[in-house]
């Protein structure tokens, strides 16, 4: 019997210096965060300066990841902030530790 291949998918939350939040989805967290930081991704994150990785979750199946992304996007701001604080109480840019 063949086993399912596991993949890497991520939900991530970026924050700006003023506290604006962005929730995204990717299959390559390092690449996507570098794209946000370099400004090559046009749109919301560039406009509002959301380039500080403050939270992420790892998944192996795309459907679970997309369900979670939809769930988080429906949450109010306070609930999102509590989630961030549970992993990153000082809202540090955790991409510095992850990708250097």
Image (cartoon, helix red, strand yellow):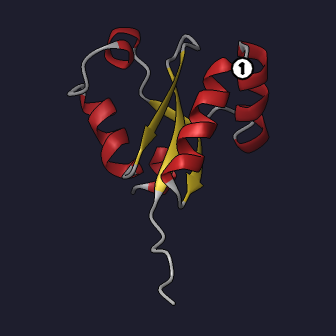
Dividing the picture into quadrants, the one containing residue 37 is: top left
Looking at the image, which is closer to me, 5 or 12?
5
- The answer to whether 90 is drawn above or below residue 4 in the figure is above
Q: Within 10 Å of the Cα at label 1, are there few (<14), some (14-19), or many (20+) other Cα atoms?
A: few
How many circles with numbers are drawn on the protein? 1
Q: Is residue 78 visible?
A: yes
- The answer to whether 57 is drawn above or below residue 54 in the figure is below
Q: Residue furthest front?
A: 1
User: Which residue is labeled 1 in the image?
Assistant: 75
Query: Which secondary structure lies at badge 1?
Result: loop
Looking at the image, which is closer to me, 2 or 38?
2
Horizontal arrangement in the rendering, residue 74 relative to residue 66 (left or right): right
* Quarter of the picture holding the C terminus: bottom left
Residue 45: x and y in percent read 38, 19
- The answer to whether 65 is drawn above or below residue 45 in the figure is below
Q: Is residue 93 visible?
A: no
Looking at the image, which is closer to me, 1 or 30?
1
Residue placed at 67% from the left, 19% from the top?
Answer: 74
- The answer to whether 35 is drawn above or below residue 72 in the figure is below
Residue placed at 61% from the left, 22% from the top?
Answer: 73
């Amino acid at each position: 019997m063949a086993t399912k291949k596991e993949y890497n998918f991520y939900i991530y939350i970026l924050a700006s210096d003023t506290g604006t939040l962005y929730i995204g989805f990717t299959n390559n967290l390092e690449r996507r965060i570098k794209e946000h930081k370099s400004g090559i991704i046009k749109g919301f994150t560039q406009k509002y300066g959301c380039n500080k990785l403050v939270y992420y979750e790892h998944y192996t199946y795309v459907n679970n990841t997309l369900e979670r992304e939809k769930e988080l996007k429906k949450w109010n701001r306070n609930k999102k902030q509590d989630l961030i604080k549970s992993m990153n109480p000082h809202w540090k840019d955790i991409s510095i530790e992850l990708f250097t």
